[in-house]
Image (tube, helix red, strand yellow):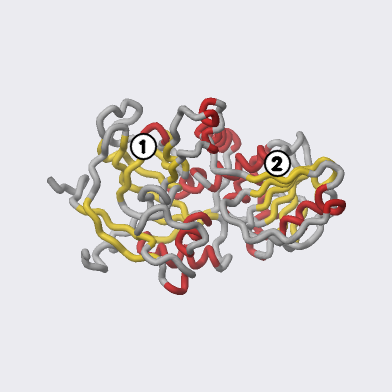
């Protein structure tokens, strides 16, 4: 039976026709509210961060895993109902949903603590509907308990931008007090930078966005410059957040001997040819970053709370989700874009 707490339908956005944002890949949808199955939570969304992965899905850089999927995987919400076999959460609890939503738990990667590499891994907003909606389902075993004390908009970017940035930072093998270069400075990079700074690193930010360079200075970067500039000192570690393959040789050339470059994105344009002596010789390392483990998530959320991480947010009502993605594509977002509940959304279109 429908009620204010448990309506018959949900409103959201689905990727109907992947393509450039100018072609309108998102379509407003109204769908029946799903019943939570075994181990699942029905969650009323309080905020959903807008990740560059959502943009890659919308624009077709990542092939869809299912038709007309609701994107969004930085989800903050309240448990509206629980399915059978849920013991960790109860209705009313505040929870977070992230990119990783399922693994087999039995393969050699899962057994070794590398569940992010599980061949059977599943992802929110790619393999199942995500948070660009007012209600969504989350698997309880992959949800995170969230504090009541923080604004939903400030928590949402932590659930992917923050977690992935944290894993990328660890993959970059930054030594204590080391010199770190960040290429691109959006939602993920501005959070990873604060963890690195809190650990005593010297952070250099290289990005084409003048607004992002200003934010980097405010957060404590020792230098800022254009993405193709040379930092003022050799780097021990670097992270490439911008999905631009041309920057791989640029960042490798900026590394000191034995330095490591971690590429943080799920999608990257083609990497130009590398010159061995200029880019890889002297034991420079090139690493990719693939999703995250739940342990990464727990460690990062604990770290964020301990250091008092500052989240810079650009809020959008849910009804303007296409504009949020278009602004992200055009580098017009300061910090992280976040979708918030929109009382008017859902009244503006008719059910199919």
Residue 94 appears in which quarter of the rendering? top left
Residue visible at 70% across and 41% down in the picture:
172
Residue 90 appears in which quarter of the rendering? top left
Residue 87 appears in which quarter of the rendering? top left
- Secondary structure category for the residue under label 2: loop
Crowding around mark 2 (Cα neighbors within 10 Å: few <14, some 14 to 19, many 20+) is many
Q: Give the distance between the C-alpha atoms of the residues marked 1 and 2, in whole angstroms.
A: 30 Å
Residue visible at 26% across and 37% down in the picture:
37
State whether residue 84 is above or below residue 69.
above
Left or right, 289 with respect to 27, comes to right
Residue visible at 22% across and 52% down in the picture:
32
State whether residue 3 is above or below residue 37.
below
In this view of the protein, can residue 10 be seen by the observer? yes
Please report contact status of discs 1 and 2: CB closer than 8 Å, yes or no.
no
Crowding around mark 1 (Cα neighbors within 10 Å: few <14, some 14 to 19, many 20+) is many
Residue visible at 56% across and 36% down in the picture:
300
Q: Position of residue 194 (x, y in %)?
A: 64, 44
Q: Position of residue 257 (x, y in %)?
A: 85, 43
Left or right, 124 with respect to 218, comes to left
Q: Nearer the viewer, residue 78 or 9?
A: 9
In this view of the protein, can residue 314 be seen by the observer? no
Is the C terminus in the top left, top right, bottom left or bottom right quadrant? bottom left
Residue 21 is tagged as: none
Q: According to the image, label 2 marks what residue?
A: 172
Left or right, 105 with respect to 214, comes to left
Q: Nearer the viewer, residue 62 or 129?
A: 62
Q: According to the image, label 1 marks what residue?
A: 139
Left or right, 103 with respect to 173, comes to left
- From this viewpoint, which residue is outermost toward the bottom? 22
């Amino acid at each position: 039976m429908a009620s204010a707490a448990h309506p018959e339908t949900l409103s959201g956005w689905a990727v109907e026709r992947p393509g450039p944002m100018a072609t309108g890949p998102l379509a407003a949808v109204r769908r029946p509210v799903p019943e939570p199955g075994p181990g699942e939570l029905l969650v009323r969304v309080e905020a959903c961060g807008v990740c560059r992965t959502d943009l890659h899905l919308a624009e077709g850089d990542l092939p869809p895993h299912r038709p007309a999927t609701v994107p969004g995987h930085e989800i903050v919400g309240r448990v509206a109902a629980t399915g059978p076999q849920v013991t960790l959460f109860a209705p009313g609890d505040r929870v977070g949903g992230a990119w990783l939503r399922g693994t087999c738990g039995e393969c050699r990667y899962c057994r070794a603590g590398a569940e992010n590499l599980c061949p059977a891994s599943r992802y929110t907003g790619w393999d199942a509907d995500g948070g660009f909606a007012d209600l969504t389902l989350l698997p309880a075993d992959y949800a995170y308990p969230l504090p009541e004390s923080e604004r939903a908009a400030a928590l949402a970017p932590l659930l992917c931008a923050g977690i992935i940035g944290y894993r990328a930072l660890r993959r970059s093998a930054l030594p204590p007090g080391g010199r770190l270069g960040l290429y691109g400075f959006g939602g993920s990079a501005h959070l990873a930078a604060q963890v690195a700074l809190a650990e005593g690193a010297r952070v250099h930010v290289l990005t084409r966005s003048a607004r992002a360079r200003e934010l980097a200075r405010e957060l404590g970067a020792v230098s800022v410059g254009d993405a193709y500039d040379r930092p003022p000192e050799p780097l021990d570690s670097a992270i490439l957040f911008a999905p631009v393959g041309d920057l791989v040789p640029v960042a490798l050339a900026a590394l000191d001997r034995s330095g490591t470059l971690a590429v943080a994105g799920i999608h990257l344009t083609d990497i130009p040819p590398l010159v061995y002596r200029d880019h890889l010789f002297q034991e420079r390392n090139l690493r990719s970053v693939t999703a995250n483990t739940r342990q990464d998530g727990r460690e990062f959320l604990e770290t964020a709370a301990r250091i008092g991480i500052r989240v810079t947010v650009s809020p959008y009502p849910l009804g303007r989700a296409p504009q949020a993605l278009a602004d992200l594509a055009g580098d017009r977002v300061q910090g992280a874009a976040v979708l918030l509940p929109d009382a008017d959304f859902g009244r503006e279109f008719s059910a199919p």
